[in-house]
Structures are given as structure tokens and as C-alpha cells.
Amino acid sequence: MHFHVHFAVGRYISRHLISEAWGRGFVHIKLLGDLPVGSGSLGEARLAARYLSKYVTKTFTDPGTRALGMHRYDLGQGFQPKVTRLHGDSPGSVIEQASGVLGAEPAVRWNSDQVLSWDGPPAIWAQWDI
């Protein structure tokens, strides 16, 4: 399986630490620079968002990158995963439903509410090791 992952962080993280955490081989780091003096964290965040949006948008619209109308994930030929829609009145209720479907609790959970310096939109993340 091939993974191609992009993420943006607002501070320096050593390549060694990222590579060790990733554990799947090659890691390339691109510094998003050339900001005007005094741009601040909002300018940096906008530049990172613009870069990631441009990259993701290209993979949606460039017929040379992927066939238009096709899913953005690769599967074994003939395999189509079952779509499961979850609805809830809180993130906790949706994660509880997902845990029921997956038959396990998340191995890792993260919530932006736990980060005092978080100034982006509310975000949650869960990972199931199944």
C-alpha cells in the first residue's frame, strides 16, 4: 500500500521525529516561506492552507492525476467498501457509533479543545487499530 500524506504544523518539528513517528519510509519536508515581514501566524496559516488546498484540488480536477468521478482511494480490483453513515448530536456520540461498527474503541483520540493554544476551527481525530 502506498501512502502520500500532507500536513502542516505551525512550529518546527525535527525531521528525525517525523520520520520516526511516520515509520513508513521516506519523509520530505517543504518549508512554506517567502512571506512578507510581519505576516504572523495568520499569514503562515493562510499560506499553508492555500498550498494544501491547491494540492488537494488538483487531485480532484486534473484528469492526468485521477479519473474524474472516481473515488480518491485505491482498492484491490473489484473491491468496494461498504459505506456507513453516522449521525449524532455530539462528536462523542459519533465516535461511539463508529466504535460499535468497528468493534473496538479508538486506540488514539485527539480533540482541539485539549490544546490551549489552538486557534483554528474545532477539530477531532480518532484512530482505530483494527
Image (cartoon, helix red, strand yellow):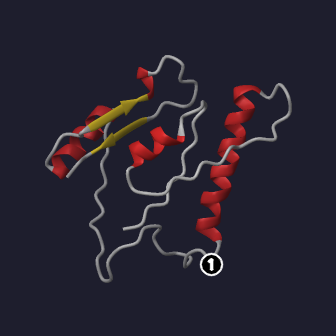
Q: Position of residue 55 (x, y in %)?
A: 64, 58
Give the residue at x 23% y 48%: 129
Q: Amino acid at mark 1?
A: Pro
Q: Is residue 79 above or below residue 110?
A: below
Residue placed furthest toward the right = 36
Element class at badge 1:
loop
Residue placed furthest toward the left = 103
Give the residue at x 63% y 70%: 61
- As rendered, which of 113 and 28 lies closer to the eye? 28
Residue placed furthest toward the bottom = 78
Q: Quadrant of residue 113?
A: top left
Question: Horizontally, is 80 left or right of 37 in the view?
Answer: left
Residue placed furthest toward the top = 116
Q: Position of residue 3 (x, y in %)?
A: 44, 61
Question: Horizontally, is 38 left or right of 121 in the view?
Answer: right
Q: Quadrant of residue 66?
A: bottom right
Give the residue at x 22% y 38%: 96
Give the residue at x 31% y 54%: 85
Could you tell me how many numbered marks the image carries? 1
Q: Is residue 106 above or below residue 23?
A: above
Q: Position of residue 109 (x, y in %)?
A: 31, 34
- As rendered, which of 23 and 60 lies closer to the eye? 23
The N terminus lies in which quarter of the figure?
bottom left
Question: Horizontally, is 104 left or right of 13 in the view?
Answer: left
Residue assigned mark 1: 63
Q: Position of residue 99 (x, y in %)?
A: 20, 44
Q: Is residue 75 above or below residue 86?
A: below
Q: Residues within 10 Å of mark 1 (few under 14, many from 20)?
A: few
